[in-house]
Image (cartoon, rainbow, N blue to C red):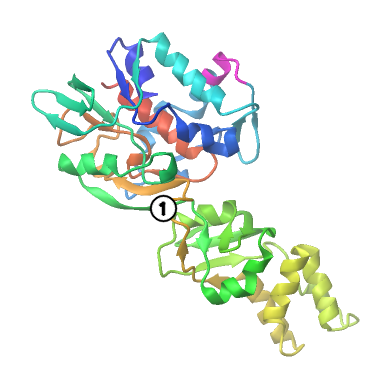
Amino acid sequence: MCAIEAGKRGRRVAVLEHADRLGKKILISGGGRCNFTNLHCQPENFLSSNPHFAKSALARYTPTDFVALVEKHRIPYHEKILGQLFCDNSARDILGMLEQECREVGVSVFLNTKIQEVTRTTEFIVRAPAAEFRAPALVVATGGLSIPKIGATSFGYDLARQFGLNIREPWPGLVPLVLIPEDRTNYCDLSGVSAEIVASCNGQQFREKMLITHRGLSGPAILQISSYWKKPQQIRIDLAPGSDLTAAFRDPKVPRTLTVLRSEFRKTLPTRLADRWLDQHAPASWTNSALADLERKVHEWEITPAGTEGYEKAEVTAGGVDTDELSAKTMESRKVPGLFFIGEVVDVTGHLGGFNFQWAWASGAAAGRAL
């Protein structure tokens, strides 16, 4: 995106890619269909040590702008849920579109270019084994540490540190959680069971699906809240949002038995989860206060995760190049003229659902228009 915008302005642009093809992360995103933006993109959908930093770029390149590009290339797409836009066919359509836009404005792409050294004299000098590149402007769009098997490294952070920029300590974002051994024993044989929940932590909450895995918890609600969780904090889960599972017992004619309670729980929760929850938390008595306590526990299940599945399974890396080091308008370093950082390498992390791509397009456009 940055190369395209710079190329439109007549700049000579080289894209240096260390992999054997462009856009590997685009290709695996959204289950191969690329959730390329979100119609409801707002600054509140992003996590950063400076919540205002992303506003300028996001306002100047919006989801509507990217959708116009998709439609120009006649790529069929659909809205899934909550404003999430996906390709009808394949993520390859989005990658092909970006490659074509690059070709049309004369951008040169160099694949398999492993960078050995970056120095700066009057201009930047980038050395690779078989070539040397020189330019007055250098843009770092190397992403974070997530999904190392497709080539993620700490290169962008290392380069920022080399030029004296501060880094906000990175951590895995949008990542499944691992439960402590006791909770794993109690629940992880329910692997594959899914329920709509509300997950809360650090003043944030998300109402979406939770999935039990063989090691812990995943699903959209858990991935969302994981970006805000830090060890050893608790996460609170409402297993039955908006439901009153013990309401039937207010009728004096309803017998207070485990059989009735089980059938009430099964109306809202998946059967196996309902049964397991009651195996673990069945009331010691049938008093009103015992039932009220059971009801409260269902809406306030507090778990203390053992950790996360780490960068291997994390969709994004939170933290990164400190936004205080960069111009919010251009993404240029305040200390080093001509050095720009865009996308995931910066301390701006989107929620699940197309927001991280929109930050990539918006920050890329901001830098591309300023080079």
Residue 166 placement (x, y as % from top left):
21, 47
Residue 176 placement (x, y as % from top left):
52, 56
Who's the residue at 63% across and 57% down the image? 211
Residue type for callout 1: Pro
Residue 244 placement (x, y as % from top left):
74, 69
- In the drawing, does residue 94 fall left or right of residue 161? right
Q: Is residue 137 above or below residue 292?
A: above
- Which residue of the protein is positioned furthest toward the right in this rendering? 253
Residue 251 placement (x, y as % from top left):
86, 78
Q: Is residue 289 above or below residue 29?
A: below
Who's the residue at 38% across and 31% down the image? 19
Q: Nearer the viewer, residue 53 or 303?
A: 303
Q: Is residue 259 visible?
A: yes
The residue pinned by badge 1 equals 172
Who's the residue at 58% across and 17% down the image? 71
Q: Nearer the viewer, residue 285 or 14?
A: 14
To which quarter of the image does residue 327 belong?
A: top left
- In the drawing, does residue 184 fall left or right of residue 357? right
Asked if the magenta segment contains residue 33, the reply would be no
Placement of the N terminus among the 4 image quadrants: top left
SS for dot 1: strand
Give the extent of the magenta segment: 69-75
Q: Is residue 4 above or below residue 36?
A: above
Q: Is residue 177 above or below residue 343?
A: below
Placement of the C terminus among the 4 image quadrants: top left
Q: Is residue 47 visible?
A: no
